[in-house]
Amino acid sequence: MSRTAGEIKEVWPDKHVTIVDPAEKLLSGFQPEVVEDLHGQLDARGIEVRPGTSLAALPSTEPGQADAFTVTTTDGEEITADIWFRAYGVSTNSGYLADGRLTTLNSRGQVPVTEFLNVEGYDHVYAVGDITDVAEAKMAGYAMQHAEVVAKNITAQLNGEPPTATYQPLPYPMILLPLGPNGGVGQLPSPEGPFVAPASMVSEFKGADLFTGRFIGQFGPTA
């Protein structure tokens, strides 16, 4: 949600943006410097954060649909706005596997995988991204790392070799969180542990184009 707020303020700097979050602070579990930097950059952009509260009831309009409404938070304050975005209620999109013919899903609808990212019980079936039961946050950066492991293992099998690439989740979370093209916060892995990335690095790696340049290079679209 913070990224969306940053993008809105970049294009419409005079818009008032409010983030309502039941958590007491954003990015819980990340390095204190990252959390402090995020709150500081949000404040600098005039983005209001209301932590430790939520909406008493959903707005009368659909998310992403422009139409004025007023809501009340659980601490009794009113918010009037002309559009809202839903940033909660994540569920695994695995309904097509619900019949159990391939594998038994866990309680979160996720697929059990091995360290090679094989679906358990199969040597030539792999899973990547949110659908896996890997114990980590479900984020695009991790899914891209999954894909690299699976690509190596499939290539090895096509060459008649056993797959050797494995995936192990980090002992701490990582993130690149842009706030528009020129700001943002990050936490990345390093040999010494979690590295706090400055806004300039977040912008260079992701914020400037949200990885579109990277994917154009990978997929090479012609149209």
Image (cartoon, helix red, strand yellow):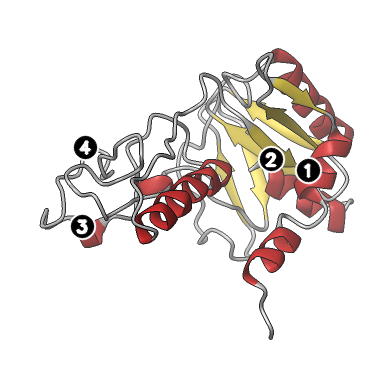
Q: Earlier in the sequence, mark 1 or mark 2?
A: 2
Residue type highlighted by circle 4: Ser
Residue highlighted by disc 1: 179
Tell me the number on the disc at residue 2: 2
How far is mark 2 from mark 3, CA to CA? 33 Å
- Answer with left or right where residue 55 lies relative to residue 83: left
User: Residue 97: horizontal and vertical position, in percent?
Assistant: 20, 57
Residue 36 visible in the displayed image = yes
Tell me the number on the disc at residue 97: 3
Mark in the foreground, 2 or 3: 3
Tell me the number on the disc at residue 57: none
* Local SS, label 1: loop
Mark in the foreground, 2 or 4: 4
Q: Earlier in the sequence, mark 1 or mark 3?
A: 3
* Local SS, label 4: loop
- Residue situated furthest bottom in the rendering: 223
How far is mark 2 from mark 4, CA to CA? 29 Å
Query: At 66% across and 63% down in the image, what residue appears?
Result: 215
Residue 45 visible in the displayed image = no
Residue highlighted by disc 4: 107
Q: For the residues labelled 1 and 2, say whether their Cβ atoms are less than 8 Å apart.
A: yes
Q: Earlier in the sequence, mark 2 or mark 4?
A: 2
Q: Which quarter of the figure is the N terminus placed in?
A: top right
